[in-house]
Image: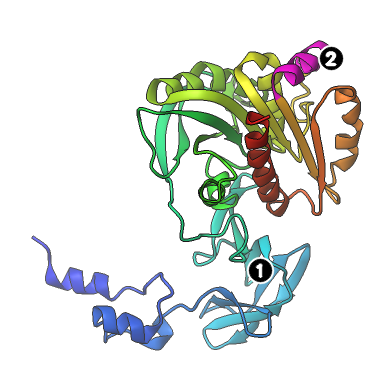
């Protein structure tokens, strides 16, 4: 039996949303809440175009925000610490330091990067391809499958387009994240579900299925942790693809990834060129720069891949890996492929643009 005092205690806990006090009271009659118990929006763009960051740390004495390789000291205003930033629209990873301690802020958006949870600020224009729009929306479902590489259960996410018909065949895109991220990255930071929704609604893409898996593969060997990211191809071909074909009607298959995920996409496609109609390497490489795996780097394999599938390569103009990308131009010299340089660094602002272009290119190639 529910204890009435326990229930009241539960209701009196500090809310973790950002609804203004008066609206919260009107909806739920929470008259016992005081204004200092409420948490304001953590960031917003004001009328002058500045971005105001407002973080709730009532017991802190010093709060710093690390953004774009600079440290901004926030000003204490009551229970809040605030600052004003000049930022263009885009996504910005941030670190929060409270009294000298690095923390995750529970009110800022949270993703995964550098093998840990990370905060970010996301400033989205309503015209962006990744904005939430009033269009039909697909769904994202999670499933746990056996990973034969790590001998563990792993989660995969699958985007299904609006109006998904279980009796219809769809193209499937296997989309991979970068190093230190996981299967959530293309959803939280990449906003791939909204991108797909919008491109489909605008007739830039046909309805498709998108599958996202964890590419950070490790296995414990003799008391040591062994990185096995280059073995992702086995996980995909032996576990993920069979699962997908068992549960969905698959038409053509495509593979793409960013950074480390691009290496995994390249290895998988070059070792299994018959499987894919298109390959996307975002800030990406044919070579495996992490483990040094080289068996797939073969002119004959590259020729075979480019003959049966389209190859898309892209990178930012200030990406620190641009010299490696340019060096790899020699590997695909003479083979038909798409190469594009974007404005930006090794970052989600670039990768969001790349997946938009890749999906549009996929549609163009299908109708050539």
Residue 120 locus on image (x, y percent): 61, 61
Main secondary structure along the magenta-highlighted residues: helix
Given the current orientation, which residue lies at the most extreme left position? Answer: 1
Q: Which of 135 and 116 is in front in this view?
A: 135
- The local crowd at label 2, few if under 14, some if 14 to 19, many if 20 or more residues have their Cα within 10 Å, is few
Residue 51 locus on image (x, y percent): 66, 76
Residue 10 on the magenta span: no
Quickly name the residue at label 2. Answer: 299
Tag nearer the camera, 1 or 2: 2
Quickly name the residue at label 1. Answer: 100
Q: Is residue 94 left or right of residue 10?
A: right
Given the current orientation, which residue lies at the most extreme top position? Answer: 300
- The local crowd at label 1, few if under 14, some if 14 to 19, many if 20 or more residues have their Cα within 10 Å, is few
For the C terminus, the image quarter is top right
Residue 308 on the magenta span: yes
**In this rendering, is residue 182 above or below 125?**
above
Task: Read off the magenta span.
Answer: 296-309
Give the total of numbered labels. Answer: 2
């Amino acid at each position: 039996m529910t204890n009435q005092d326990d229930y009241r205690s539960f209701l009196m806990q500090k809310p973790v949303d950002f609804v203004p006090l008066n609206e919260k009271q009107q909806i739920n009659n929470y008259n016992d809440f005081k204004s200092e118990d409420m948490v304001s929006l953590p960031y917003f763009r004001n009328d002058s175009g500045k971005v105001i960051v407002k973080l709730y740390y009532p017991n802190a004495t010093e709060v710093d925000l690390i953004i774009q390789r600079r440290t901004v000291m926030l000003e204490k205003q009551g229970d809040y610490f605030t600052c004003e930033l000049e930022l263009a629209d885009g996504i910005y990873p941030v670190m929060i330091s409270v009294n000298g301690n690095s923390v995750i802020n529970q009110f800022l958006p949270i993703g995964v990067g550098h093998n840990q949870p990370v905060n970010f600020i996301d400033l989205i224009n309503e015209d962006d391809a990744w904005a939430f729009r009033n269009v039909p929306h697909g769904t994202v479902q999670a499933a746990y499958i056996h990973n034969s590489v790590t001998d563990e259960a792993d989660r995969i996410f699958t985007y299904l387009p609006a109006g998904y018909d279980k009796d219809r065949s769809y193209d499937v895109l296997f989309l991979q994240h970068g190093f230190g991220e996981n299967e959530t990255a293309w959803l939280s930071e990449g906003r791939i579900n909204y991108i797909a929704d919008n491109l489909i609604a605008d007739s830039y893409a046909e309805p498709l299925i998108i599958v996202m898996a964890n590419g950070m593969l490790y296995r414990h060997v003799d008391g040591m942790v062994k990185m096995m990211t280059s073995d992702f191809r086995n996980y995909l071909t032996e576990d993920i693809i069979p699962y997908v074909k068992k549960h969905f009607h698959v038409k053509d298959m495509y593979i793409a990834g960013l950074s480390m995920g691009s290496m995994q996409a390249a290895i998988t496609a070059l070792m299994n060129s018959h499987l894919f109609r298109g390959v996307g390497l975002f800030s990406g490489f044919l070579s495996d720069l992490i483990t040094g795996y080289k068996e797939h780097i073969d002119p004959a394999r590259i020729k075979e891949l480019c003959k049966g599938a389209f190859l898309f390569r892209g990178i930012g103009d200030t990406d620190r890996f641009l010299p490696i990308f340019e060096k790899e131009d020699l590997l695909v010299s003479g083979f038909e492929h798409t190469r594009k340089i974007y404005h930006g660094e090794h970052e989600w602002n670039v990768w969001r643009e790349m997946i938009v272009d890749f999906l549009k290119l996929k549609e163009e190639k299908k109708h050539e």
